[in-house]
Image (cartoon, coloured by chain):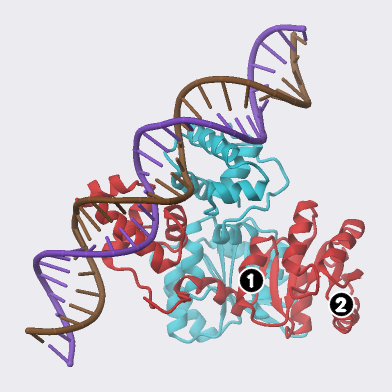
Chain colours: A red, B cyan, C brown, D purple
Amino acid sequence: MADKVIRVLLVDDHQVVRRGLRTFLEVQGDIEVVGEAADGQEGAERAAELKPDVILMDVKMPGTDGIEALRLLRDAQSAARVLIVTSFTEQRTVVPALRAGAAGYVYKDIDPVALADAIRSVHAGHVLLQPEVAGALLSQDQAGGSGQGRGNALTEREREVLTLIADGRSNREIARALVLSEKTVKTHVSNILMKLDLADRTQAALWAVRNGVGG
Amino acid sequence: MADKVIRVLLVDDHQVVRRGLRTFLEVQGDIEVVGEAADGQEGAERAAELKPDVILMDVKMPGTDGIEALRLLRDAQSAARVLIVTSFTEQRTVVPALRAGAAGYVYKDIDPVALADAIRSVHAGHVLLQPEVAGALLSQDQAGGSGQGRGNALTEREREVLTLIADGRSNREIARALVLSEKTVKTHVSNILMKLDLADRTQAALWAVRNGVGG
DNA sequence: GGGCCCATGAGACGGCCGGGCAGTCGGCCC
DNA sequence: GGGCCGACTGCCCGGCCGTCTCATGGGCCC
């Protein structure tokens, strides 16, 4: 790993931040900063011409932000691995960033040495998150944004229904399986979707699989 | 980072695996294997007495498995960071493992050098996942680039659509995402269901998750 | 006894889903 | 050129899905 230099592109609207990162990373030996950009659009362009191994990207930037930049890179089939380096515990941006293809998500208060390690990990093909980020990711289901029905615990019956949804069953089949009318099943399904803040049974099935319901 | 040795505990029921890991890690210089254990119970006990910095833990073990061991460690308020090193793409165990406090989750086929980096990252306080794992968590696209040879007669386009179905998207959303008419999406969906012998999009989403489409 | 939650279920309704049928366009093979 | 296939799209339509409203009965708490 130390025998090959990792080529890095910095994308951040603050020149001071870029300078600081560059200064530190350059002395690492196995990391070379090959370019900088001040916003997502420019970042994508630089990435296309410089073909860096890893891109350190801020989320909040004027114009094209980090998430949009990730999409641009993906559309351009960039091989670069993107490590998001952002300022706050922006729970909102974590999931979109990862969905858009980010390979990592860390905060700017990260220990510089740890950042270098993070770059190496991301370059090695891993997805890397800071613990607070992973926590935010996993707790999103129990979050329950709006006021009502918080603590969103599904009832026993609802969990039974969800399990069958996660098995790919239709309302009619679920009704037969639980000896209920289809209407009742629908009521349960509606309550499940409301409590988990999901749009339809497909999302419910996926939620169940990921959260080990019915497994 | 290199000025301080990372003390590691190996927990795996296969002695061969432990031996291999130990041999490799010992030559890293900054990693020291301070102990081994063959199951979760023993792992928790060793952790209590040896107080390692990082624990490499298998999930599937006779008796107390890795998840249960994580709970034991948590109850014992262990400061050790646990990196799960497991054999398969066991989607079911990822979420429970992270919920139970795992600091990382990688597969055994990991590049040894990358494993050493993973240990350093985890030790530095990060949460680290291999891309396949993160993919299972988020179930999102980002095709690997290489042609996935095996796989039912689904065409490239159909696979794209299936990936979005597996993300819980509606036909309309898929249409917008791929810049198509909703009717075309429906046609693709119909073809997918026919080819895979499935009844509806929910079953298709579940099929995709279980067969790693979109990871 | 009066709330309150849970489970059950009816009727009505709009909407999305999936299938059937039909058609265009472009690439590939012989 | 003719045949075949994949991608794309329109119209029609039956049916399942999910929401809303309203209602009953049982268990629990104060």
Task: Name the residue: 92% across, 57% down.
Answer: A49
Tell me the SS state at disc 1: helix
Task: Name the residue: 61% across, 67% down.
Answer: A95
Q: Which residue is mark 2?
A: A25
Above or below residue A80? Residue B32 is: below
Q: Earlier in the sequence, mark 2 or mark 1?
A: 2
Task: Name the residue: 34% across, 46% down.
Answer: A170
Numbered disc in front, either 2 or 1: 1
Drawn side of residue A24 relative to residue B27, left or right: right
Residue B28 visible to an observer of this rendering: no
Task: Name the residue: 85% across, 82% down.
Answer: A17
Count of numbered tags: 2
Query: What x and y, as percent, mark residue C21?
Result: 50, 21
Above or below residue A117? Residue A125 is: above
Q: Residues within 10 Å of mark 2 (few under 14, many from 20)?
A: many
Which quarter of the rendered picture does the N terminus of chain B lie within?
bottom right
Query: What x and y, as percent, mark residue B47?
Result: 51, 81
Above or below residue B153? Residue B115 is: below
Closest to the observer, C13 or B97: C13
Amino acid type, callout 1: Val
Same chain for marks 2 and 1?
Answer: yes
Drawn side of residue A160 relative to residue B157, left or right: left
Query: What x and y, as percent, mark residue A200?
Result: 44, 55
Closest to the observer, A79 or A30: A79
